[in-house]
């Protein structure tokens, strides 16, 4: 695997911040739609509309979707881990907890990924810094969940566990997605394939299990949220994700994990009237410190600043994943 050592310029930072708003916005859009539509219906509309948009982008860019069965088998596997399971669990969880809290819990994806990569890959071993980051991150999650875990399975606890389950699925998707480099699949084609595969499974399931045509017609606000979720937080977010990935590398793009809860909390507070407790912000602080320990650059920058040396970005192995938010 090739090492990557890119420092981000103004364009990459703008794209990264925009991406964090798009992914943070997904929690806001779900928060708007979840009272009017069932979880499977929301997810089916999300991946269905995003699949249409991404397939159009593939055609406009002159690319071709593969027809080989092994490739589509991989697309369906990736779609299961990266879309079907996490989207459904997170949407269901957001019916009972604030969108900001869901985004904070979703940040645990990084910690699950570090642990999974240690056992399932040969080149992403658990270092001392990463182990410390995982411990801090788990402490933050436990702090947010609080003593509810000791007093039975309340609905709110189950909702938080559902979001954590979605984060765990994202972690396995990141490991599973490494195979697409071996299959020589262009990143945009991979994203389009796994979203399309997800739509082919989720649309029939939503029609069969939730029968959305029996529900009252959603308001224009709900439809706007669905369009934002599909076209902005999924299709456009994927395009920006792979743009930043190609110019700044996988290590730099992990910085978006710091920013997603910020935008999700601000949107939820301003537009949905949500309020988070002190324990949630304390837990987020633990998670932020844990992410810094895993990433390594903030601590290295402090050491270099104290020593008077100019900071530089470290070279780390690049791993291409298809994480979508």
Image: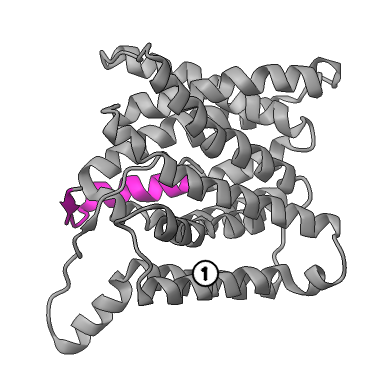
Crowd around label 1: few <14 · some 14–19 · many ≥20 (10 Å): many
Does residue 265 sit above or below 128 in this rendering? above
* Left or right of residue 120: residue 83: right
Relative image position of residue 139 (x, y in whole percent): 59, 75
Visible residue check, residue 295: yes
Image quarter of residue 155 = bottom right
Does residue 279 sit above or below 72 in this rendering? below
Report the front residue among 262 and 291: 291
Which residue does the image show at 35% across and 15% down from the upper left? 66
* Left or right of residue 51: residue 103: right
* Magenta-colored segment: predominant secondary structure: helix
Region in magenta: 2-21
* Left or right of residue 12: residue 144: right
Which residue does the image show at 52% across and 69% down from the upper left? 287
Report the front residue among 214 and 90: 90
Residue 8 lies in the magenta stretch: yes
Q: Which residue is mark 1?
A: 287
């Amino acid at each position: 695997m090739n090492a990557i050592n890119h420092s981000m310029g103004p364009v990459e930072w703008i794209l990264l911040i925009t991406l964090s708003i798009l992914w943070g916005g997904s929690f806001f859009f779900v928060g708007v739609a979840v009272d009017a539509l069932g979880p499977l219906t929301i997810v089916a509309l999300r991946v269905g509309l995003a699949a249409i948009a991404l397939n159009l982008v593939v055609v406009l860019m002159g690319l071709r979707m593969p027809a080989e069965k092994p490739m589509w088998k991989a697309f369906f596997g990736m779609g299961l881990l990266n879309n079907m399971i996490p989207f459904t669990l997170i949407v269901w969880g957001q019916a009972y907890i604030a969108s900001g809290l869901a985004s904070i819990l979703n940040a645990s994806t990084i910690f699950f990924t570090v642990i999974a990569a240690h056992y399932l890959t040969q080149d992403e071993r658990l270092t001392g810094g990463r182990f410390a980051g995982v411990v801090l991150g788990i402490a933050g999650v436990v702090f947010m969940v609080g003593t509810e875990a000791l007093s039975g399975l309340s609905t709110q606890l189950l909702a938080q566990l559902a979001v954590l389950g979605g984060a765990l699925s994202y972690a396995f998707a990141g490991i599973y997605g490494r195979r697409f480099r071996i299959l020589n699949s262009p990143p945009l084609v991979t994203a389009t394939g796994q979203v399309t595969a997800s739509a082919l499974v989720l649309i029939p399931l939503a029609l069969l299990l939730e029968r959305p045509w029996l529900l009252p017609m959603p308001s224009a606000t709900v439809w706007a949220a669905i369009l934002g979720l599909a076209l902005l937080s999924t299709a456009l977010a994927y395009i920006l994700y792979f743009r930043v990935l190609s110019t700044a590398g996988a290590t730099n793009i992990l910085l978006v994990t710091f920013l997603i809860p910020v935008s999700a909390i601000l949107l939820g507070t301003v537009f949905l009237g949500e309020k988070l407790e002190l324990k949630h912000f304390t837990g987020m602080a633990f998670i932020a410190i844990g992410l810094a320990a895993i990433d390594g650059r903030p601590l290295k920058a402090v050491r270099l600043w104290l020593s008077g040396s100019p900071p530089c970005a470290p070279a780390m192995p690049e791993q291409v994943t298809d994480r979508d938010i």
